Amino acid sequence: MDNTEQDAIELHGDEEIVEVIDLDDTEPGPDDLADDLEDVDFEDGGNADDEGWETEDEMEAEQDDSELTFSKHSGSVFCVSLDPATNSMAVTGGEDDKAYVWRLSDGEVLLECSGHKDSVTCAVFSHDSSLVATGDMSGMIKAWKVETKEEIWSFEVGDLEWLEWHPCAPVLLAGTDDGNVWMWKIPSGDCKTFQSSACQATSGKVLPDGKRAVVGYEDGTVRVWDLKQGNAVYVIKGQDGHQGALTTLACNKDGSLVLTGSVDGCAKLINTATGKVGVRVRKKKMEKRVSKASKDDEETNSVESVGFCNTLPLIAVAYLEGTLAIYDLSTQVLRHRCQHEAGIVHLQWEESSSVVSTCCLDGALRLWDARTGSMVSEYRGHTAEILDFTINREASVAVTASGDNQAKVFCLQRPDR
């Protein structure tokens, strides 16, 4: 990928648009992260101030390709993540107001995270896998020590939108529906807030340098926050921002680029060193893919997930109406449209290949070769929609979370392995 100039692609409804971004300004290298975090001015945070969503699109499973089924939840399973240190543990959160840490090999429960007031929609391991953070829709956030199986910290905010650990420190960030982004040291609870206009902070991501976070908001604005100074380095809004709520965002491996998606049907590429979104160049019309019965094309064509390929200059954009679009950043070309039988919920690139996986409302997990646009394999077993999934580093195992109250472990077999 050319480091001096990079092409960015924006998808907007039924139009395909290309943006060109100048990347001449390079990001400074990260300083010692631990020292930086020691310099952050934290404040004592007072507690700030429910509703779950329901999905009942049941379907019959004709086959079950999974190796293991985790059935401890008594309601829909909304989220899943793997421990980054060993990839041997999963944590799932559900409609039953609980999260479970469990072993992938045999499904044994290692830690039951209880005491929540609402559906647990966020559950994530810290960078070293020693801690787990769980958050429910009402804003109750808890931190747990995996080894001792104890709750070590809790805090209550407004309705929770997202929760994420710092990439290399025991620091937790969260976004809420009042527009605030919170940052805590765990377990001391020292607190700092990043305040903006009173609209939901719908998605967020700490950049790999550990110094900045990118946050998307309900009004279409994107902010790049300096975590040490507490100020917004860049604010992308108006014509440069989205025309609807941010639904998803992802960064490339070095954090120089961020890809954002929105209910407006657009995916935008942002240079985090300059805050530039670039110049729009309109290209050919994109074939209409939404259902004729749809009364709201924008909502149907919402971007649900985005991601960068680590091995090739490619990005992927997944739509609620069922299209996975693969773009080549070097040539500004739409490479492939991979059509699904139902809406796409989430996508994830493999760490070391050009294979991208998707989960759908039809309960299937699919692997796609981004070089050819062809489906590599399909895995079934759930009797309801898959709401989240994750893949291990070796891309040999996928863990799914579903509306059928189950999480499943799939062994990913490919001929080239």
Image: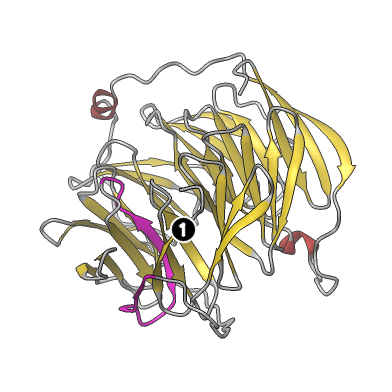
Quarter of the image where one finds residue 103: bottom left
In the depicted structure, whether residue 412 falls above or below residue 228: below
In the depicted structure, whether residue 258 falls above or below residue 360: above
Residue 115: x, y in percent? 25, 72
Give the residue at x 85% y 58%: 288
Q: Is residue 230 visible?
A: yes
User: Which portion, as a residue range, is magenta?
Assistant: 67-85
Residue at the extreme right: 284
Q: Quadrant of the N terminus?
A: top right
Q: Is residue 141 visible?
A: no
Residue at the extreme left: 148
Give the residue at x 29% y 36%: 168
Residue 247: x, y in percent? 59, 53
- Can you identify the residue that label 1 sits on? 413
Name which residue type carries label 1: Gln
Quarter of the image where one finds residue 284: top right
Circle 1 — which element?
loop
In the depicted structure, whether residue 67 falls above or below residue 21: below
Residue situated in front as seen by the camera: 391 or 124: 391
Q: Could you tell whether 76 is left or right of 257 in the image?
A: left
Residue situated in front as seen by the camera: 195 or 416: 416
Magenta-colored stretch includes residue 82 = yes
Residue 163: x, y in percent? 39, 52
Residue at the extreme front: 415
Q: Could you tell whether 46 is left or right of 329 in the image?
A: left
Residue 271: x, y in percent? 60, 27
